[in-house]
Image (tube, rainbow, N blue to C red):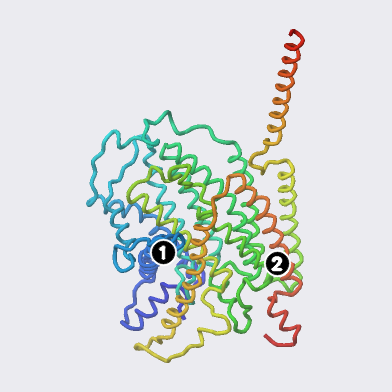
Amino acid sequence: MIKTFLMLQEFGNAFIFVLLAAVLPPLILFVSKFFRPSFPHDAKMMTYECGEAPKGSAYVMFNNRFYLVAICFLVFDVEVALLFPVLSLFKSSLNTPAAMPVFLLSFAFLFILFVGLIYEWKKGDIDWVKDSEDRKQAYMKKVAEKGRLIQQKHALEKQKV
Amino acid sequence: MPQSLAEFLDYYVANITGWNLPIALFGLLSAVIVILLFAMPLGGICTYIERKLAADFQERVGPNRVGPLGIFQFFADGVKMFLKEDTISKNADRMIFNLAPCLVTAGSLGAFAMIPFSKYVIGANLEIGVFFVMALGSLVSLGILLGAWSSDNKWSLLGGIRGAAQIVSYEIPLAIAVLSVVVVSGSMNMFKIVDVQGSGAGAHFWNIFHNPFVLINFFIYFVAALAECNRTPFDLPEAESELVSGFNTEFSGMRFGLYALAEFADIIMFSCIATALFLGGWHLPFFQIENIDLGLKIGDASLNPLIHTLIMTAVFLAKVAVLVFVVMWIRWTLPRLRVDQLMDLCWKYLIPIGFANLFLASLWMWIFSGKSMLQVLGSLLGVSA
């Protein structure tokens, strides 16, 4: 009972810290309201785009890879979060029969995930510029084709002459 | 004996004045002391030190006008930002724009609650301390992404997306490196993790010297922490030479100041965690500060905890200062990485190496039944540690 209460008190302390840190910005901004100037102007309130009038909205499409990274992260992070409590018990179970199950379970779990990472790696999903090699080859092919056409053209012109 | 800062304050107030005040009051007091009187000024001083160090590295003079050697520069900067006009662009999403700095400061300043500066000074002595710190640390990335998204600015959005991808990726090596420490010390409580790193009975010196794999994981932690704080060579979210100012382009005046402060608070926070988890926290090698007994007293209260706290905090902060210096040193030495190099470094090097080290560190624990490198060496040579 007392132990539970003490633990709650520690969580209360942590909560006070986070709360104080979170209300700090509005508090400081509120206090500085009485000291700082405020002359709003249409041009001043414009979005900054190197001094030009902004063109369109900022909510443009962005690279799909960011999304892939987020998904990879999600899997790994959940897994790491699960491993935390299991592995924190590892040391206290060292000289007991529980050591083997803790070790094997957590690392079998980790191994499966690692195989997933290797699969992703081989598929090229964690390469940022995945298709650059393909693109390069396609470009080279195109250049070669163009060169061949030009040569043909020259040959035809020579024949005419 | 007191364990957290709130109990520490309560101990002295109750013994000296005889008042019996509610402990929650001391909780608030400790939060004010740690955040307002410790973390924020330290973050401010860091901006000054950074500028001065940069000047030294580039053979310039650096700030030298405000106060002797310019040490009040950070104070002048703070006052200037405090008095600046606060502009929010018309198209910005005002609610999220206002919320974003709160999340950033909650993540970087709030996490100071879990840092054990000395045996008695820890804001909240949670059993899941390490986990809580990691969770709070990831609030910063949320704040950066929301701030960038809400400002309706192309530079901000690009910086914010990059920042989110980077911070999210580097959180995994960071967590793995921390996990190896959890395996070695068998607890998630920050206080207990530091406590077993002493040189007394039942303790195994600093965690970084526990076994070679934790040593490697310390460097993985350090690299990942650099990326988490958006410091060079991982400062892509800010990238002032390509993205104006990155995620905080639209933030002006005090809002920008809070972002800058939170960045430095973040660096100090990650250095503090590194010190507590890997570098032995408040412990000095081969010497136990707890053994100092001057026998001084105020009323019924022994002065020993106070003296220990002062020495331990000084030792802890000295280690933190070394790490912060290395972070600044790296900033003025290395150029910025490219996005694809950044992702390759994380997913192809740090994560596999980190996982292998975690596995090997656990194996070490199993084979040598929890003994550290020095203890194994001691038993081989026939010396009792």
Q: Between disc 2 and disc 1, whose residue precedes?
A: 1
> At 48% from the left edge and 46% from the top edge, which residue is drawn?
B239
Query: Which corner quadrant of the image does residue B51 belong to?
Result: bottom left
Residue B226: image location, x then y, percent: 54, 57
Callout 2, which amino acid? Ala
Q: Nearer the viewer, mark 2 or mark 1?
A: 1
Q: Is residue B50 left or right of residue A100?
A: left
Q: Which residue is mark 1?
A: B49
Residue B23: image location, x then y, percent: 39, 71
Label 2 Cα crowd, 10 Å radius (few <14 / some 14-19 / many 20+): many
Disc 2 on helix, strand or loop?
A: helix
Image quarter of the C terminus of chain B: bottom right
Q: Which of the labelled discs sits on residue B361, or is there none?
A: 2
Name the residue furthest bottom. Answer: B295
Name the residue furthest front. Answer: A161
Residue B85: image location, x then y, percent: 28, 46
Viewer-closest of B368 and B256? B256
